């Protein structure tokens, strides 16, 4: 029997068979479970109940699951594990870009889902809790407000871009391997997904570098990973 203090999960899926399968399986694993069948209901329950994590299908009857992620992320760091039959890489990248913590394809095994869920829960509150403010050269990052400025001007980042930048700035001057970065930002299940990392580093450089084609902040360590320059005047190139 689930105890009242057990973590509360919000499962968002309109398929009755998935609901009938997931609720007892998650309850047996020690979680409390609340179900939602629409995006609107999910947003209402997420705000009212503040669940420990959300398991979210993308194909909802009233809106795309990615819109649910986009609506939640500005005010919530609740871990989101996407559970969906959409297995195209573009869908995965879009969901992760918007702030999902992980992506599990349907059909799925409950063991894999529980493992991904445990990882997502361990990541909260994530790598951004400390320190609260970071500065390298003219670039400033405030973890508490999730704001980034360059020379006093705001830089608009997606949630994943922000997490990646915060991680690199916290370790400025140190080489971080691809696996270290992928594990910290996307989770251990994605340590081999180096293409995710290349795409996001490229997007981030476009937004924070004065000359993205000749980066002075996010420096490439060939075959190893990346290093954020301690001194913004460094001139090493990708």
Image (spheres, grey):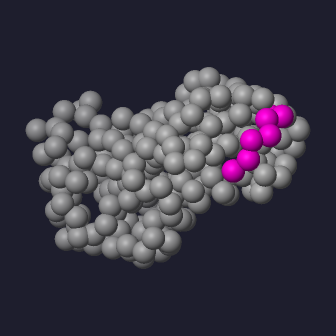
| Residue 36 or residue 200, whichever sits in front | 200
User: Is 132 within the magenta?
Assistant: no
**Helix, strand or loop: magenta stretch:** loop
Task: Give the side of residue 65 with respect to residue 71, left or right.
Answer: left
Task: Give the side of residue 217 with respect to residue 49, left or right.
Answer: right
Q: Residue at x 57, y 47 (%)?
A: 222
Q: Residue at x 72, y 28 (%)?
A: 230
Q: Quadrant of the N terminus?
A: top left
- Residue 213 picture location, percent across and down: 77, 57
Residue extent of the magenta highlight: 232-238
- Residue 21 picture location, percent across and down: 16, 62
- State whether residue 80 is above or below residue 228: below
- Residue 81 picture location, percent across and down: 38, 54
Q: Residue at x 36, y 39 (%)?
A: 121
Q: Residue at x 38, y 74 (%)?
A: 86
Residue 69 visible in the picture = no
Residue 111 visible in the picture = yes
- Residue 24 picture location, percent across and down: 15, 53
- State whether residue 94 is above or below residue 143: below
| Residue 195 or residue 130, whichever sits in front | 195
């Amino acid at each position: 029997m689930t105890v009242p203090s057990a973590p509360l999960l919000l499962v968002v899926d309109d398929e009755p068979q998935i609901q009938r399968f997931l609720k007892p399986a998650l309850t047996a694993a020690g979680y409390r479970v609340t179900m939602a069948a629409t995006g609107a209901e999910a947003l209402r329950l997420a705000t009212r109940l503040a669940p420990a994590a959300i398991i979210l299908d993308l194909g909802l009857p009233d809106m795309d699951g990615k819109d649910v992620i986009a609506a939640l992320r500005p005010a919530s760091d609740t871990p989101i594990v996407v559970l969906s039959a959409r297995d195209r890489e573009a869908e995965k990248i879009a969901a992760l870009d918007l702030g999902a913590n992980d992506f599990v394809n349907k059909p799925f095994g409950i063991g894999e889902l529980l493992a991904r869920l445990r990882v997502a829960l361990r990541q909260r509150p994530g790598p951004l809790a400390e320190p609260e403010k970071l500065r390298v050269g003219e670039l400033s990052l405030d973890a508490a407000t999730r704001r980034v400025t360059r020379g006093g001007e705001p830089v608009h980042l997606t949630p994943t871009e922000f997490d990646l930048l915060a991680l690199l700035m916290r370790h400025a001057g140190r080489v971080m391997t691809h696996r270290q970065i992928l594990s910290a930002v996307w989770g251990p299940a994605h340590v081999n997904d180096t293409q995710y990392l290349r795409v996001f580093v490229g997007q981030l450089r476009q937004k924070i570098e004065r000359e993205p084609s000749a980066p002075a902040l996010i420096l490439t360590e060939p075959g190893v990973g990346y290093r954020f320059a301690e001194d913004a005047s460094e001139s090493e190139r990708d």
